[in-house]
Image (cartoon, rainbow, N blue to C red):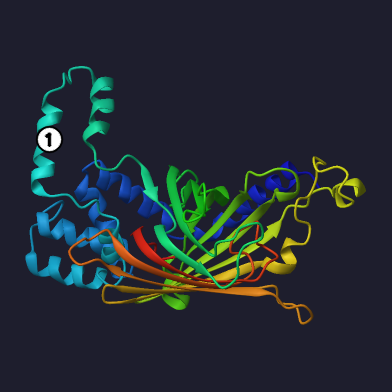
Amino acid sequence: MKIYKIITLLLLFILGSVDIYAKTSIDYAEALKLYKTHHYKKAFPIIEKEAKEGDKEAQYLLAFMYENGYGIQKDATKALQWYKKASSTFKYVTKQNENITTDKEDEILQYAYTKFDLSDPYAKKEISKLTNKNFGILPYKTNYLLPLSYSGKKYPGYTNNIEAEFQISMLKNLTYNLFGFNEVISAAYTQKSFWQAYSKSAPFRETNYEPEIFITFPTPHYMDTQSHIKAFQFGFNHQSNGQDKYKSRSWNRLMFSTFWQWRNLFLKTRLWYRIPENKKSKAFYEGKDPNAKGDDNPDIEKYLGYGDISFKYLYKENQFGLKIRNNLRTNHNKGSIEFTFSRPIYRFKTIYWYIKYFNGYGESLIDYNRNVSKVSLGFAFYRGLF
């Protein structure tokens, strides 16, 4: 089946599924628009209704309205009550995403803003981006630098089993509430590199490139309270290593993910379907045609399976992570386990000690069919909850 047909079927499935969210989301979405345009009196009754039904975001907004007298008379007591109700989830998540700057930094940014001619509205819009701390690019997966990464075995073709590893991961939200269900369509990019920094000439042993696009649907309140499922996600994922001939690795997947939370325990499950590719020629496997087109790794699912499960647990400022993957086969069972730990470094609020242990298959694409046991130590500059 052609890729475009599969993607079309996925979109039809998504569009056919979204009606399950129509129960309350349209009114609340309208209330959010009213809130953002400062029509607080009109937004208040809808937000209050959702807050009383347990929606954490609505509870936070309601508390903020009471605190500042937006659309309702100021009431510090009620503001505190609603902040307490909201704090179990929503306030923590929003706090984690704040861009932390000092008052002095804010003053400098505002002073710089006043130096421009803002008489033209389009110029004003673009100039404001220069002093806005949020450029619309958000961190996605954990961003880290691990200067010390020790493997129990040496890698094929390399003499050093100590290397450096780093990951850069970013996300850009493209649209919000396009279908009226508070859904978000996003594009993301993750790059993970394995660098033989302590070898002669310090070559990069492997780099994996992972662009993806997905749509995320927050769950209705009744589903959240009954099952603790926070969101569903559908998407397309490409992963490759940018090499050629016999070192080339790549695959395309359709992804389905669910996000769960129980107080300070976070869970993400992923299922994927690999989009089939044509097999390479017989000459390729005989070593006669290294440039043959087709599937670089036809047996990758035997090692990486069809999904994974990730846990994150917060204990005060410490975060523990566990990721499990298995091919679920009784014969030739393969899988992997990854454990991570992070905590802030002294006074730095956005830099963390980061320890990672990996054992199994699929640490990188070039090693998808090779068992790797590895311990790494370094720093994280952002740590995700899922």
User: Image check: 217 left or right of 53?
Assistant: right
Task: Say which quarter of the image contains residue 155.
Answer: bottom right
Residue in front for this viewpoint, 236 or 334: 334
**Relative to 224, residue 12 above or below:** above
Does residue 179 sit above or below 253 in this rendering?
above
What residue occupies the far front of the structure in this picture? Answer: 200
Which percent across, then down, holds residue 83? 19, 67
Question: Which quadrant of the rendered structure holds the C terminus?
Answer: bottom left
Q: Residue at x 31, y 49 (%)?
A: 32
Total residue callouts: 1
Crowding at dot 1, Cα within 10 Å, few <14 / some 14-19 / many 20+, comes out as some
Seen at 65% across and 71% down, the residue is 371
What x and y, as percent, mark residue 118? 18, 21
- Classify residue 146 as left or right of residue 95: right
Side (left or right) of 266 relative to 344 = right
Instruction: Note whether residue 176 is visible.
Output: no
On the image, numbered disc 1 is attached to which residue? 110
Query: Outermost residue, right direction?
Result: 282
229 vs 73, nearest the viewer: 229
Q: Nearer the viewer, residue 63 or 101?
A: 101
Point 26% across, 68% down: residue: 86
Label 1 element class: helix
Q: Position of residue 262 (x, y in %)?
A: 39, 77
User: Would residue 75 be visible to someone looking at this image?
Assistant: yes
To which quarter of the image does residue 65 belong?
Answer: bottom left
Which amino acid type is shown beneath numbered disc 1? Gln
Measuring from the top left, give residue 109's x and y in whole percent.
Answer: 15, 36
Residue in the image at 47% along x and 65% along y = 149
Q: Is residue 162 above or below residue 85?
A: above
